[in-house]
Image (cartoon, rainbow, N blue to C red):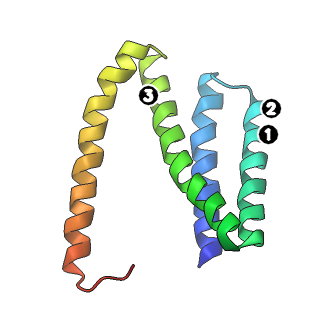
Amino acid sequence: MGRFWDVLTIVAITVWLLPLVVVGLIPVELAVMGLLGLVAILAIGRKSGGPLGHLVRLTLRVALPVASLFAFLTIQTGGSASEMLAALGPIMVIVTVAFGFYIMFSGLSGGRRG
């Protein structure tokens, strides 16, 4: 099951990098190097296991959504800091509501699973 999540992470990284290349915010070479670097980090984290592997996977699980949000805001607002901050508010409302639904639905499933 762990490899499935790794594949989903690789797909997410690719989906995150492609629009940046298409819009012209980063060159193709940088996207390829970034993809290879992130995949290497993910593979090394999986292979090493233990606390280091857990730390690597946790970092990617946190860093990837944050970087994706930043890339989305940059593309949608043209990189204007004031517009990015203005767009961040409604996005955070959506995230908060989604997290609230997550808590409600996980409470319906009964018992705590860790």
Label 3 crowd bin: few (<14), some (14–19), many (20+), radius 10 Å: many
Would you name the residue on which mark 2 appears?
A: 29
Residue 33, label in figure:
1
Give the SS element for disc 2: helix
Residue lying farthest to the front in this orientation: 51
Position of 71 relative to 80 (above/below)? below
Which amino acid does the dot numbered 1 rest on?
Met
Q: Quadrant of the C terminus?
A: bottom left
Left or right placement of residue 59 versus residue 111 in this view: right
| Mark 1 touches mark 3? (CB < 8 Å) | no
Give the SS element for disc 3: helix
- The percent position of residue 107, horizontal first and vertical second, equals 21, 75
The CA span between labels 2 and 3 is 22 Å
Mark nearer the viewer, 2 or 3 = 3
Which amino acid does the dot numbered 2 rest on?
Glu
Q: Quadrant of residue 3?
A: bottom right
Left or right placement of residue 91 versus residue 70 in this view: left
Q: Who's the residue at 26% across and 44% down the image?
A: 94
In terms of sequence position, does the residue under pointer 2 or pointer 3 come before the other? 2
| Mark 1 touches mark 2? (CB < 8 Å) | yes
Q: Who's the residue at 60% across and 30% down the image?
A: 20
- The percent position of residue 17, horizontal first and vertical second, equals 63, 39
Q: Who's the residue at 24% across and 65% down the image?
A: 103
Which amino acid does the dot numbered 3 rest on?
Leu
Q: In which quarter of the image is the N terminus?
A: bottom right
Residue 73, label in figure:
3
Mark nearer the viewer, 1 or 2 = 1
Q: Who's the residue at 37% across and 14% down the image?
A: 82
59 and 90: which is toward the camera: 59
| Mark 2 touches mark 3? (CB < 8 Å) | no
Q: Quadrant of residue 7?
A: bottom right
In terms of sequence position, does the residue under pointer 1 or pointer 3 come before the other? 1
